[in-house]
């Protein structure tokens, strides 16, 4: 049995890609996309006709609408190849506007429904800012399920659980990157690998909190830098993995055991924690890593959204 097959026994495997032609090789259940992944895909020759088709079909419409239609086209192609859900992201430039994030989420789902896709097969990705979480809570009340992304802190996870969002995506690799850069020459890789990886520890804390208190929000580890981070989270609800790391898992037959266990979390002695807006903002501010990585992530996704718009204008 390969490590990928073994992982699928404990965890729902999700492909983190916009390149839907790669999906068949790994048989993931779900898939996630973001502006950076879609940008990467449409720059490949295989996907340029799709980009040109969408632009020509809706030329003259507002650019943000054409963008959403492109994202949904990719999502529909992905859904034709997987049994589960696809995550499609609201424009990161709306991360601090709850009303606009909500409206874009509704429009994305309506575009999917116009293509015959059931609402339960779509997760609307929203940045886990305070405003994003409020937008997600409102979307959930409408029956639209959400995936809270760019999540780096326990405070963000607690607030998402309170909002009863469907799923969160803690970014393992970017947490790891920050701590490694911060430590500089003092970083010892062997001491910060596997279960001791700071990104892995963050997801484990969130997972244990959710399972201990019966919070239904799904935990999906994301943004992996190496296979060791993935295997250290075997048993997490879902893990979204790049095609490159999926290939490494598929090529290995090394033993893989469950690392996270919901039943074990029940016996832990954990405090009850809740946040109002002021408490959330202060807790996030106190976490330098999360504050920096959240801001950096929003900026990076916004830059790639602009690049994608430029490609659409030029098409």
Image (tube, grey):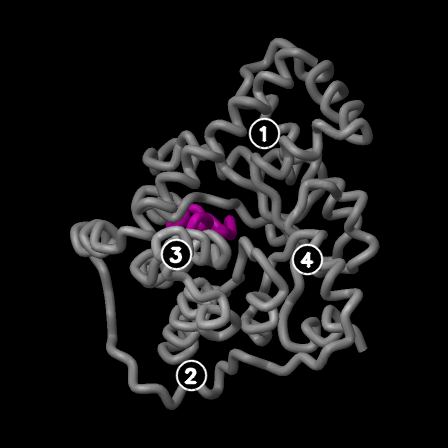
In space, the residues marked 2 and 4 are separated at their CA atoms by 28 Å
Classify residue 74 as left or right of residue 98: right
Label 2: which secondary element: helix
> Which residue has dot 3 on it?
185
**Is label 2 in contact with label 1 (beta carbons under 8 Å)?**
no
207 falls in the magenta region: no
* Residue found at x 66% / y 63%: 13
Name the one closer to the observer, 126 or 16.
16
In space, the residues marked 1 and 3 are separated at their CA atoms by 44 Å
Residue 163 appears in view: no
Q: Crowding near pointer 3: few (<14 within 10 Å), some, many (20+)?
A: few
* Residue found at x 38% / y 54%: 184
Query: In the displayed structure, would residue 154 be above or below residue 146?
Result: below
Q: Earlier in the sequence, mark 3 or mark 2?
A: 3
The boundaries of the magenta stretch are 136-151
Label 1: which secondary element: helix
Of labels 2 and 1, the one closer to you = 2
> Which residue has dot 1 on it?
68
* Residue found at x 78% / y 60%: 27
Q: Earlier in the sequence, mark 4 or mark 3?
A: 3
Residue 295 in picture, x, y percent from top left: 35, 40
In space, the residues marked 2 and 1 are separated at their CA atoms by 40 Å
Numbered badge on residue 265: 2
Q: Crowding near pointer 4: few (<14 within 10 Å), some, many (20+)?
A: some
Numbered badge on residue 245: 4
Of labels 3 and 2, the one closer to you = 3
Name the one closer to the observer, 204 or 264.
204
């Amino acid at each position: 049995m390969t490590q990928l097959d073994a992982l699928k026994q404990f965890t729902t495997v999700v492909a983190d890609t916009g390149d839907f032609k790669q999906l068949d090789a790994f048989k993931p259940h779900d898939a996630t996309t973001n502006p950076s992944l879609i940008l990467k895909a449409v720059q490949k020759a295989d996907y340029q006709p799709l980009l040109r088709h969408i632009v020509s079909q809706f030329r003259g419409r507002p650019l943000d609408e054409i963008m959403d239609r492109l994202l949904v086209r990719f999502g529909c192609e992905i859904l034709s190849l997987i049994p589960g859900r696809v995550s499609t992201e609201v424009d990161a430039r709306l991360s601090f506007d709850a009303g606009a994030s909500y409206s874009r989420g509704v429009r994305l789902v309506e575009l999917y429904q116009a293509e015959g896709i059931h609402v339960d097969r779509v997760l609307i990705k929203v940045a886990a800012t305070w405003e994003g979480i409020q937008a997600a809570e409102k979307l959930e009340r409408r029956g639209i399920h959400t995936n809270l992304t760019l999540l780096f802190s326990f405070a963000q996870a607690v607030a998402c659980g309170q909002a009863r969002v469907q799923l969160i995506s803690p970014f393992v690799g970017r947490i790891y990157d920050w701590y490694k850069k911060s430590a500089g020459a003092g970083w010892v890789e062997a001491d910060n690998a596997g279960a001791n990886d700071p990104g892995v520890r963050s997801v484990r804390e969130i997972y244990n909190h959710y399972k201990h208190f019966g919070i239904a929000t799904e935990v999906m580890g994301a943004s992996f830098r190496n296979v060791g981070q993935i295997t250290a989270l075997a048993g997490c609800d879902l893990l979204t993995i790049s095609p490159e790391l999926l290939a490494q898992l598929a090529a290995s037959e090394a033993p893989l055991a469950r690392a996270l266990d919901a039943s074990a979390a029940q016996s832990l002695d954990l405090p009850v924690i809740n946040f109002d807006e002021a408490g959330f903002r202060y807790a996030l501010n106190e976490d330098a890593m999360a504050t920096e990585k959240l801001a950096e992530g929003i900026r990076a996704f916004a830059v790639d959204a602009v690049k994608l718009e430029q490609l659409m204008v030029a098409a």
